[in-house]
Every structure is written in C-alpha cells, then in structure tokens.
Amino acid sequence: TIEFTGALHATVVKQVRLKNPSSKTLMYNAILVGRDADDFSLPKGNTFTIAPRRQTSINVEFTSRFLRPAEAVLLLISKSVGGIGGATLTFSLKSEVKHIEPADILKCKSPCYEL
C-alpha cells in the first residue's frame, strides 16, 4: 500500500522503485484503475523500461479533490522483450486529507442587528 497524505487540493508525489535482477531488459505498462483513479497520475507516462541488473523509479502523483479518502490500484503489467516477461505488480493507492488550507480570507463588516 502506498499512502498519500497532505492538504486538501495539494499534490503529493510518491516514488515506486522497480529493480530488474535479470540479465534481460524488462518493459512494463502501468494502468491506474479503481473508484478514484482519475485523481492519480503518472507524469512520466505509462510505459517503463528497466535495463538488466538496474533499477528505475516511477513517480505517482495524487491531487486531492474531496475530504473523503481516495482509493485506486496501480497495475504494472509486463510486456515481453526478447521472449522474457516480468511478473505483474499491483500496488494499492490510498489517500488521507490531514488539513485544509484556506483559499482566501475575506473581512466583512455588517451590523449584528437591524431594527
């Protein structure tokens, strides 16, 4: 589970590190699914290549629109490169709004009571 915690309307970025221990290149397609999948994004695109015996990081962004917790699933599906494919990876994405920042402060003057 990857948890995104922040203020309402703030963008939170988390990284997922993928390692390739094999001697072949791995390629993955990333898909965001679930009730709140539209609130999560992959700014570097949906396709990732990992060189042999290397690692890469995937940035996952979340922008909160509501006070309720958001939930989605990040699916990383391997594409075959040279006859080798990696395992399908699944990550649960959850959010929590910890505080609310005011968008603006307005000062008003008015009588408390009018006859």
Image: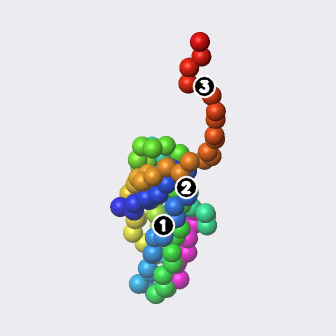
Q: Residue sitting at 44 percent across and 81 percent down?
A: 20
Between disc 1 and disc 2, the foreground one is 2
Which residue is the site of mark 3?
111
Asked whether 66 or 76 is in front, the reply is 66
Between disc 3 and disc 2, the foreground one is 3
Give the spatial CA distance, label 1 vs label 2.
13 Å
Instruction: Find residue 3 and report its horizontal and vertical position in percent.
Output: 40, 60
Instruction: Give the mark nearer the N terminus: 1 vs 3.
Output: 1
Residue type, mark 3 in image? Pro
Instruction: Give the mark nearer the N terminus: 3 vs 2.
Output: 2
Q: Is residue 21 above or below residue 8?
A: below
Q: Residue furthest left?
A: 1
Which residue is the site of mark 1?
14
Q: Residue sitting at 39 percent across and 69 percent down?
A: 87
Which residue is the site of mark 2?
10
Residue type, mark 1 in image? Lys
Q: How is the image coloured?
A: rainbow
Assess disc 2: are there few (<14), some (14-19) or many (≥20) residues with their C-alpha within 10 Å of its C-alpha.
some
Asked whether 67 or 18 is in front, the reply is 67
Q: Which residues are magenta?
A: 46-51
* Secondary structure under the numbered disc 1 in the rendered image: strand
* Secondary structure under the numbered disc 2 in the rendered image: loop
Q: Residue sitting at 42 percent across and 54 percent down?
A: 98
Residue type, mark 2 in image? Ala
Left or right: 18, with 59 as reference point: left
Instruction: Find residue 100 and report its horizontal and vertical position in percent.
Output: 49, 49
